[in-house]
Image: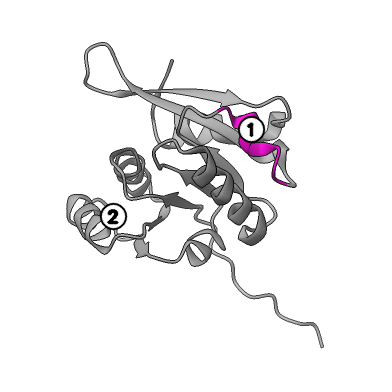
Amino acid sequence: MPTETPPTDPTPTIALIGATSIAERIASRALRSGFNVVIDDVSDARLKAISLNLHGAGSSLNLTQSIESAIRSADFIIDALPDDLEVKLELFTLFDKFAKPTAIFITTGSIPIDDLAEITFCPDRCLAVRLTASPDGNESVVQLMPGRKTSAQTLKTCTNLFLNSLAYRAA
């Protein structure tokens, strides 16, 4: 008798680490585009605030104070915390430990992605993203910044995510 495979959710999941303004901007676009979004933060107050701000943006929003549960099923794990090298190194270590084998690790900070990717077993799936306001201030502009070992497939997947699915304008 053949074994049944459990159904999988074909909708990609984005895990945002840190209930920050950049996480809110990404989550808003992702929810409107039909993605599942998980936001992790240690602060209950920040999670409540971001939940209120995203109310009505989509029904696929989950909030957690457990980074492990946030990243386990995510296809894209986005670190949206302010720059602190030790914190980000710890995050990427956790991503590496608990993420599914195909997850892409993304940082939004200014720490070079190569510094973070080198502590993982998957530097080919690590990428930095910079979101800045357009000159007129009406939209965000995205710049994808691959590391030395970022694969062409990771870059292509993230290009599709940010430029096509989330409709950011390229820098």
For label 2, count other residues whose C-alpha is less than 10 Å away and answer few (under 14), some (14-19) or many (20+).
some
Whether 23 is among the magenta residues is no
Name the outermost residue toward the right.
1
Which residue in the structure is indicated by mark 2?
58
- Residue 77, x across and y down, in percent: 52, 48
Question: Mark 2: which amino acid?
Answer: Gly
Position of 135 with respect to 81 (left or right) is left
Whether residue 159 sits left or right of residue 151 in the image: it is: left
Q: Quadrant of the N terminus?
A: bottom right
Magenta part of the chain: 112-120
Which quadrant holds residue 131?
top left
SS at mark 1?
Answer: helix
The image quadrant of residue 148 is top right
Q: Position of residue 98 (x, y in %)?
A: 62, 61
The residue that mark 1 highlights is: 115
Where residue 74 sits: x, y (%)? 54, 56
The reply to whether callout 1 and callout 2 are in contact (CB within 8 Å) is no
Q: Nearer the viewer, residue 113 or 9?
A: 113
Q: Earlier in the sequence, mark 1 or mark 2?
A: 2
Residue at (25% x, 55% y) in the render: 46
Residue 123: which quarter of the image?
top right
